[in-house]
Image: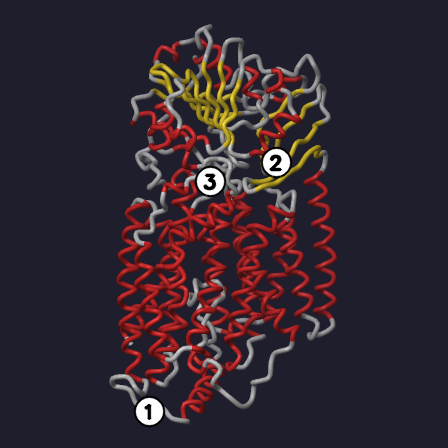
Amino acid sequence: MLPYALSIFLSAFLLFLVQPLIAKQILPWFGGAASVWNTCMLFFQTLLLAGYAYADRSVRWLSPGRQVLLHAILLVVSLASLPIVASEAWKPLGEEDPILRILGLLAATIGLPYLMLSTTTPLLQAWYWRRFRSAVPYRLFALSNAASLAALLGYPTLIEPYFGGRDTAYAWSLGYLIFALLCIFAGWKSLRGVSGYPGGAEVGMGRKGAAAAEADRAAGHGRAADAGTVAGHGKAADAGTLAGHGEATGHGTASDPLATRIQWVALSALGSATLLAVTNHLTQNISSVPFLWVVPLALYLLSFIVCFDRPAWYRRRLWGLGAAASLPVMVHYADSLALFQVGGLYALGLFLVCMFCHGELVQLKPHPSRLTGFYLAMSLGGALGALSIAIGAPLMLDGYYELHLTLAAVALMLLWRSLNLRWWWPLGCVTLSAALVLMILEELNDYRLGIREMARNFYGVVRTRDYPSEPGFRYLLHGAINHGGQLQGEDYATMPATYYSPASGYGRLFEALPDTPRRVGLIGLGAGALAAYARDGDQWVIYEINPLVVDLAKREFSFLERMKAPYEIVMGDGRLALERESSRQFDVLAVDAFSGDSIPMHLVTREAMAAYLKHLKSDGVIVFQATNRFVDLKPVAKRLAESFGLQARLVADNPDFDSGPERWFLPTDQIVMTRNRALFEHPAFKDSLPIATRPDVGIYTDDHSNLLRILKR
């Protein structure tokens, strides 16, 4: 058993480890957007479907020797993809479709290795049965599940904080090489149980009977699925199924009703869609980082392990009631930004919904002779769920509605699955569905209240809203966060407000700078409010990754139109653009590129600082927008400043106005860095604060960062 056990353990571990590993590699290239992870998940789910189909067709259509030969050839060819370090040739230039770019990048970097890993457990279980004619031991299931969870939970807590991404990628590649050799060896050993091969024996007509009996035993035990089999996303393998692969005859050969097959796909799709919708909800307002990717995925995996490895633990009345109770709670808190308080509720809700979906899948499991179709339907559902969130939602919805719609679909599935229960269950589900629809309509009405313009793309939802104050105020929302605004009326149109008031870090800096023409770089346009500080003779360069922001800044606000200095807009990620360009020699470089309230961590690394300083004059100034509900950037910025010989000061502005235009001066934290120490002697900075160094926060790099250590308590 050893070669089978080692191969399965390594495949499950590597399969789950590579998901956050490769996503983190490419995250900086696409603005740190939350949609990067969703697009990666779409790729993983789709390749899992292909991997399971390959395993199934291989065992059905090819002789044992050809199965092993084909798989060995593919494993050897896949080694050409090592090491799994994304080529910089895939870095976007600013005009490409990010979804297609990411899918192409992933296919070129990890496509074939990922496909090979996804086939391992079902294929090796089939080979194991063919050699030994016995059920695959349960400890192989437990081993695979343990490896999957170890990779998921170990990456953000033990690997990412202490090892660089490139080093981890090389270690992963070495592990994959070992896995490939083990898998080929296990395949060769499995041929000893087949007639016509060294050590083989005649099987004869008794094979079908043995397969059918074995399938019946597997069905009786109920251990149909190994969550880690094909990446743990519901593409699990049944020992009996893989043993027989359709060879069982007699009872149970009739096809399943269409309604049942639809439910296989729908339940799997709902679990997958809920996973990605909840993950997207969390990451768009905190930060798109591995920790917030893998915790929901681990809960999703755990529900598979419980439901498929221990079917007796699923009770519809218990888990269905829990899922039903969680739906209105998640809808109610969908607009809450107190994510640390409600994050636990979302984690619990996700687990309860997945337990319901996956538990019902176990209830609908067909006879083992038809389980390959069952698992293929589950694979298809998982891919469709990922497709609906990663691509369907940005293309078809103009706002963040996918979480609400997914929860409404779960309520309808609860109703469908309760129709055969006592009368009060369907009545309760109808009542829940009606109440949930009313709640969702109310939430969506509030979401659109006062909205003038709303649009969505890969980088998120951007809205403009008018507030009926005196004077009037129009502001830009990215997600649920104010990204600057403009006072209405000719007398106030060029007055900087929100995070850019005269007492903010930006206001004090422009007051303290010499009265000479300035070259200013701005990463992140927002509403364009910072342009109010432009003067005749200045030259401004604005870097913006989201074309929707540029469009709305020009159509809904007049800062750019009224700007006194000429400006240039460079489309694409600001850091990548700075790395490509020759030195701009900026006097001021402002880094203000949030997505919702999520901080693109790739903009606060040592490599990013090197790009900034390349474009900065020797006495130039860098300003970091550090206003954030969840993340404390101050110790990170302090380390970066020290490492490059800059002095850093914090400007904390806490205005307190309840009327007039000043009511739109918002509290803000901005960090000002420069080598020009005389700057901080100017009276404008008399209230600026030194920043303390934290011993547990080091210099962030592209390879190494730790969000957990800078979360606000």
Query: Residue 314: x, y in percent?
Result: 54, 71
Does the image show residue 349?
Answer: no
State which mark lies toward you, 3 or 2.
3
Instruction: Using the image, tell me which numbered label, if any, was put on residue 29.
Output: none
What SS does tag 2 mark? strand
Q: Is residue 465 above or below residue 61?
A: above
Which comes sooner in the sequence, label 3 or label 2?
Answer: 3
Q: Which residue is drawn at the image coordinates 62% and 25% (left, top)?
A: 554
Q: CA distance from mark 1 to mark 2?
A: 68 Å
Query: Residue 598: x, y in percent?
Result: 50, 38
Does the image show residue 59?
Answer: yes
Kindly identify which residue carries mark 2: 462
Instruction: Give whichever of 646, 520 is nearer the camera.
Output: 520
Query: Residue 335: x, y in percent?
Result: 62, 43
What SS does tag 1 mark? loop
Counting the numbered discs, the total is 3
Instruction: Using the image, tell me which numbered label, if any, was put on residue 202.
Output: 1
What SS does tag 3 mark? helix
Q: Amino acid at mark 1?
A: Glu
**Image quarter (top left, top right, bottom left or bottom right) of the C terminus:** top left
Q: Which residue is drawn at the image coordinates 42% and 77% (left, top)?
A: 59
CA neighbours of label 3 inside 10 A, class few (<14), some (14 to 19), many (20+): many
Q: Is residue 446 above or below residue 516?
A: below
Q: Amino acid at mark 2?
A: Val
Kindly identify which residue carries mark 3: 30
Farthest residue to the top: give it: 515
Which comes sooner in the sequence, label 1 or label 3?
Answer: 3
The image quarter in which residue 624 lies = top left
CA neighbours of label 1 inside 10 A, class few (<14), some (14 to 19), many (20+): few
